[in-house]
Amino acid sequence: MDKRVILVTGGNGQLGSEIGRFFLTVTANDTVWLATHRNTDRAEAFAAQFPGRCKTVSLDVTSQEAWADAAQRISAESGPITVLVNNAGKHDDALLANMPIETWNDVLQTNLQSVFLGCQAVLPQMISQRRGRIINIASLSALLPPPGQTNYAAAKAGVVALTQSLAKEVARIGITVNSICPGYLETEVFTSLPEAQLDEVRRRIPMRRLGRPEEIAAAVFFLATEAASYITGSSLKIDGGLL
Amino acid sequence: MDQSELNTKIKQMMIENLMLRLSPEEIGDDQPLFGPESLGLDSVDALQLVVALDKNYGLKIPDPAAAKKALHSVNTMAAAVRDLGKGTTPP
């Protein structure tokens, strides 16, 4: 397999590091960059386990300038980016009636604008190489929006639509753009819920369990391989059969 | 070089660089390059056009906002080239 340079945003989170781990352990040639913003501890500790092959870069995903700087730095140090995983995200739930506009804007910027900026910053490198894979982490909320998530669900549905549109813009030269819609995962967001609430969540999932971050990472890895070269504009839900 | 000559040169540049199966006469001066009723170019074409305009005319398009304005049609590309004062330099 050719040497690849992979950039994963949200690199300090559990899912981000599991995505990085998949590339680093399954292949020998890939270089993984974990992009982090405010918190960097987990990403730095993780990167230290893979010296020379895993690096961290500071990146505010809502800033066009920060994206330009990060893309330039990565390209200068490791070569052009070949795989972009837009994984950074946040949620800040509130009923629409009570949602401050700042909350709406913040969630839209972090989840949706960040994907737009990331694709725009990295695509020139991919187009000049005439190869590239973009994998956007959306959410089951895009397809099955719960109450209290008008901002998050709209942003993630936007990510799915952006993915479909961009896929058509770059398909001609074999660059693929896909999204993944994870359901409930064994990450702090959900495992910190009270046990009774977690039981209720498990009961609703046909597989009766939460997904593991590595199960999302495996799909990301697959979408980045040559074997997935005819898959573009797709949205893959990984939810234990919930939807 | 008059406007019509520059427009034809730009159309030829597009045909060569984007491998369009069209003749210069089939591309309208005001025809949008992207979107409905357009030539149907994509993001790959857009970036190739930015590179070609720089290579052929020294026209630097610094950011997406400038690209959106300059790459609307053949006429807008020609205007950007003329603004640069290089419209008289044959590519």
Image (cartoon, helix red, strand yellow):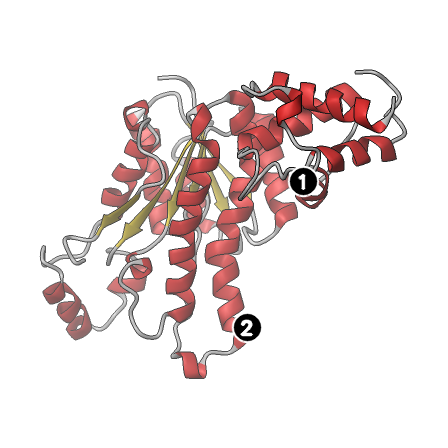
Along the horizontal axis of the image, is B49 left or right of A82? right
Front residue of B82 and A57: B82
Residue at the spot x=57%, y=33% of the render? B39
What residue sits 40% from the left and 50% below the top? A161
Residue A225: assigned label:
none
Which amino acid does the dot numbered 2 rest on? Glu
Left or right: A169 in relation to A70: left
- Per the image, the residue denoted by label 1 is B72
Query: Which is more toward the observer, A142 or B19?
Result: B19
Q: Which quadrant: the C terminus of chain A?
A: bottom left
Q: Is residue A106 left or right of residue B5?
A: left
Circles 2 and 1, Cβ within 8 Å, touching? The answer is no
Q: Disc 2 versus disc 1: distance between alpha carbons?
A: 34 Å
Residue closest to the eye, A188 or B78: B78
- On the rendered image, what quadrant is the N terminus of chain A found in? top left
**As displayed, is residue B32 above or below residue B1?**
below
* Residue assigned mark 2: A102
Task: Say which element carries label 1.
Answer: loop
Please state the horizontal and vertical placement of residue A131, each as a whole percent of the image: 46, 24
